Image (tube, rainbow, N blue to C red):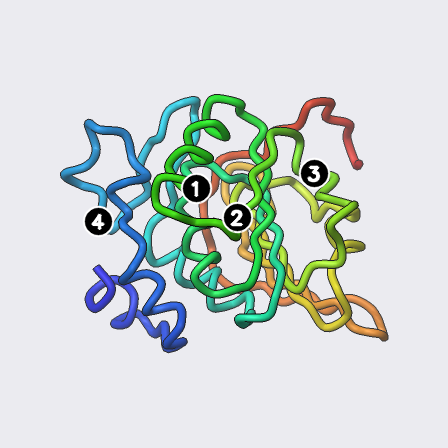
Amino acid sequence: MVERQIRARGIRNKAVLAAMAKVPRHRFVPQNAVDVAYADSPLSIGHNQTISQPFIVAYMSEALAVGPEHRVLEIGTGSGYQAAVLAELVKEVFTIEIVPALADRARAVLKELGYRNINVRTGDGYKGWPEAQPFDGIIVTAAPDHVPEPLVQQLAPGARMVIPVGREYQKLIVITRTPEGVIRRETLDVRFVPLLRDDPQPGR
């Protein structure tokens, strides 16, 4: 998986490659999908949610540009796989999942695998995790139709957010918060499940 799907497509960050090689992806998929856990595609994890394609997990992790002393926020825990990859890269991960059953399963799997630097919260990720801010990186693994301002405000100066934005199809956007303002760079065309909210309000 790492050689053919990730390194061959241009991922060069050694820590990201090592994390992708280490985290057992098959532990994060349903039992009926274990045989295809390392396939070059997203997979259903139930509740109309997916575990992202391995390349996308690696690409987003590399684009975040984080290191061992950093604290990162993830919106959309899902299976917990992206959180585990991040936990190999940074000091502490905060991750939020709106579907209680997925949050509970991710919490259990991550505990079984021995991760002690991941904090899982069940709830609406749109507003982030205010009491734990600022974050050295924010990664969003479900797609809103606009960039949530509360997440931008929770970025530390110089930090990045990697987020898919759009409706049916999205652009993967890298946002950097600088003293002069926000820098926005569009990268890949992607397709993620929508970002769910407890109380969706247009434009907010």
Q: Residues within 10 Å of mark 4 (few under 14, many from 20)?
A: some
Secondary structure beneath label 4: loop
State left or right for residue 54 relative to residue 125.
left
Cβ–Cβ under 8 Å for marks 2 and 4: no
State left or right for residue 195 relative to residue 158.
left
Disc 2 to disc 1, how far (Cα)? 10 Å
Counting from the top left corner in percent of width and height, residue 91 is at 56, 63
> Circle 2 is placed at which residue position?
118
Q: Residues within 10 Å of mark 3 (few under 14, many from 20)?
A: many
Name the N-terminal-most of marks 2 and 1: 1
Secondary structure beneath label 1: loop
- 147 to 4, vertically: above or below: above
Q: Residues within 10 Å of mark 1 (few under 14, many from 20)?
A: many
Identify which amino acid the numbered label 4 is placed on: Tyr
> Circle 1 is placed at which residue position?
80
For residue 38, the mark is 4
Q: Nearer the viewer, mark 2 or mark 3?
A: 2
Q: Nearer the viewer, mark 2 or mark 4?
A: 2
Find residue 123 and report its image quarter: top right
Identify which amino acid the numbered label 1 is placed on: Gly
Identify which amino acid the numbered label 3 is placed on: Tyr
Q: Residues within 10 Å of mark 2 (few under 14, many from 20)?
A: many
Disc 1 to disc 3, how far (Cα)? 18 Å
Cβ–Cβ under 8 Å for marks 2 and 1: yes
Q: Nearer the viewer, mark 1 or mark 4?
A: 1
Counting from the top left corner in percent of width and height, residue 39 is at 21, 48
Counting from the top left corner in percent of width and height, residue 195 is at 59, 35
Name the N-terminal-most of marks 1 and 3: 1
Secondary structure beneath label 2: strand
